[in-house]
Image (cartoon, helix red, strand yellow):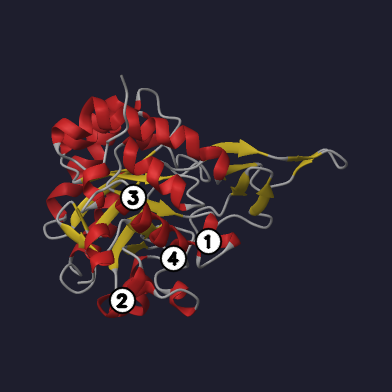
Amino acid sequence: MTAAAEVLATDLAGIALRNPVLLAAGTCGTLDEMSDVLDLSRIGGVVSKSITPLPREGNPTWRILPARAGMLNAIGLANPGIDAFESHYLPRAEKMPCAVICSVAGFGIEDYVQVAAVLDEWNGRGVAAIELNISCPNVKTGTEFGMSPALTGEVVRAVRPVVKGAALFIKLSPVAPELPVIARAAIEAGVDALTISNTIPAMAIDVHTRTPRLANVTGGLSGPALHPVAVRLVHEVYRKIARDAGVPIIGAGGVMRWEDAAEFVLAGATAVQIGAALFADPRAPLAVVRGLEKWARVQGCASIRELVGAVKID
């Protein structure tokens, strides 16, 4: 391992990562499509598209729009379904040169259990972790499980017995009331890491036609506008629950530059996810990796892990 690799190498809930940079669910294809434009051996990992039991076409066009401070999306959990994902995509997971985290979505607890059980069978054959997406604002009931500590705990307790080998992550909503309380419920139910956070519900209107610009009417806002919100949430959850519980956080939301990723680390994130930035520059993660490596060295650290939660507050 080179000196540069050593300073960025980290452990995420028992998963050894080359560096803390991950590609977020729903922004990099179904699984490995980004390998056409990005050397996946130079990042920490990839999070698959959120998979449901049955195939979904998602919402009609328009379902992605630019916003002045980011991007609006209302994809609607479009995915091939677990059967096609297992037969056509998962056989490639073992050959991917980075960690593979599979995202799971559902409309009932049984959906999460069904998909997670199939994915866990691929642990040791490419799937390192499973991320429960309980916070998608682009489908009806998509955020329901993430709004209540009781429902969050119920989902995790139902899924935990079928996830026997892979690490179990959960993706939380930025608009959930009292997010530290929900994070605590998820931790007590058995998750191994928290992803904070998802997109913020948002809307755009065409002032000439007076109609919503998204076919779904509303969608999720991602990108730079979300970043300060997500940084605060990571900081709050880290200080109130995750640090003492020994549960790592993955910061997600508006990472466009290495400085954004560094903010997440200082707030308490062990790893970060990059999403909207991939639409502007698919090679943006490489610049983030380079910047983090130089930053850690300037800070006088032998490992970036020394900087997790190291924000100075009097």
Q: Secondary structure at mark 4?
A: helix
- Tell me the amino acid under the disc marked 2: Met
Q: Which residue is mark 4?
A: 286
User: Is the residue 88 above or below the residue 214 in the image?
Assistant: below
Q: Which residue is mark 1?
A: 278
Residue 96's disc is 2
Task: Spot the residue most to the right.
Answer: 208
Asked if disc 1 and disc 4 are in contact, CB closer than 8 Å, the reply is no
Asked if disc 3 and disc 4 are in contact, CB closer than 8 Å, the reply is no
Residue 212's disc is none
User: Seen in the image, is 152 located left or right of residue 279?
Assistant: left
User: Is the residue 97 above or below the residue 46 in the image?
Assistant: below
User: Seen in the image, is 268 located left or right of residue 287?
Assistant: left
Q: CA distance from mark 1 to mark 4?
A: 11 Å
- Tell me the amino acid under the disc marked 3: Val
What residue do we see at 34% from left, 50% from top?
Answer: 298
Q: Which residue is mark 3?
A: 298
- Tell me the amino acid under the disc marked 4: Leu
